[in-house]
């Protein structure tokens, strides 16, 4: 075998892997399209196979079960959210950057309702994201924690309060005014209230020490 032929043979597994990864992404994209049309829980694997030019049994060579498909979709949605946050312009004011982060998060949920449902509402019975699929969600949490640290908030309980507030804003926006701004406009006020409470608690702790 010549050197050129050897290189070509060595490259074939990589090419197959790239094609397979690309096909998986097509399947995931079409699954989101079905979820938006029919509802997240109503995704039909038969319809999905037809949309990606596969027989339904062949679909299982990419995803061993419907829950495995949801797992891949969960990771895909969280990666999309992380990319949304990372594309935000840098701001010099840490508080403004925190407001910006919350707006981007709530806006993402409002603009991507079925993704929000899978990521935050866990509406699929029996679905629990795998450790691998959850990694982008941890990355998103870390991005939020960095914004909070920049305004002096780092205690785990305070982070829990903050995530609860953001989740509440997102759920209200999705449920009551999807695509609108009713709860989006409240974000600066909510951030002010949260940081004021942090300052008040610090004053109380300082006076009692």
Image (cartoon, grey):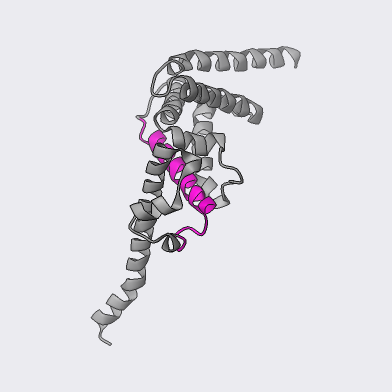
Residue 85 belongs to the span the image colors magenta: yes
The residue lying toward the viewer, choosing from 161 and 95, is 161
Rendered view: 107 above or below 34: above
Q: Is residue 141 left or right of residue 177?
A: right
Residue 180, position as x, y percentages in the image: 39, 19
Split into 4 quadrants, where in the image is the N terminus?
A: bottom left
Residue 78, position as x, y percentages in the image: 46, 41
Residue at the bottom extreme of this rendering = 1
Rendered view: 45 above or below 110: below
Q: Looking at the image, which residue is at 44% across and 32% down?
A: 113
Prevalent SS, magenta region? helix
Residue at the right extreme of this rendering = 208
Rendered view: 21 above or below 172: below
Residue 21 visible (yes or no) = yes
Q: Looking at the image, which residue is at 55% across and 23% down?
A: 168
The residue lying toward the viewer, choosing from 155 and 108, is 108
Residue 130, position as x, y percentages in the image: 57, 50
Residue 141 visible (yes or no) = no
Q: Is residue 138 left or right of residue 47?
A: right
Residue 7, position as x, y percentages in the image: 29, 77
Residue 186 belongs to the span the image colors magenta: no
The residue lying toward the viewer, choosing from 191 and 32, is 32
Split into 4 quadrants, where in the image is the C terminus?
A: top right
Q: Looking at the image, which residue is at 50% across and 32% down?
A: 144
Number of disc labels: 0
Q: Quadrant of residue 111?
A: top left
- Highlighted magenta segment, given as a residue range: 60-88
The residue lying toward the viewer, choosing from 122 and 12, is 122
């Amino acid at each position: 075998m010549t050197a050129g032929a050897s290189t070509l043979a060595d490259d074939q597994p990589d090419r197959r892997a790239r094609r397979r990864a690309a096909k998986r992404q097509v399947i995931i994209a079409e699954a989101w399209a079905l979820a938006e049309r029919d509802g997240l829980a109503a995704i039909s694997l038969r319809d999905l196979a037809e949309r990606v030019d596969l027989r339904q049994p062949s679909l299982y060579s990419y995803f061993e079960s419907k829950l495995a498909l949801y797992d891949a979709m969960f990771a895909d949605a969280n990666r999309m959210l992380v990319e949304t946050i990372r594309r935000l312009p840098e701001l010099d004011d840490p508080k403004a950057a925190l407001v910006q982060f919350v707006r981007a998060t709530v806006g993402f949920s409002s603009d991507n309702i079925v993704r929000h449902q899978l990521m935050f509402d866990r509406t699929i019975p029996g679905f629990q994201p795998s450790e691998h699929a959850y990694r982008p969600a941890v990355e998103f949490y870390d991005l939020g924690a960095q914004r909070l640290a920049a305004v002096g908030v780092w205690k785990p309980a305070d982070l829990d309060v903050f995530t609860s507030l953001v989740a509440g804003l997102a759920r209200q926006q999705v449920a009551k005014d999807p695509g609108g701004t009713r709860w989006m406009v409240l974000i600066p006020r909510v951030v002010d209230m949260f940081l004021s409470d942090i300052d008040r608690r610090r004053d109380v702790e300082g006076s009692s020490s």
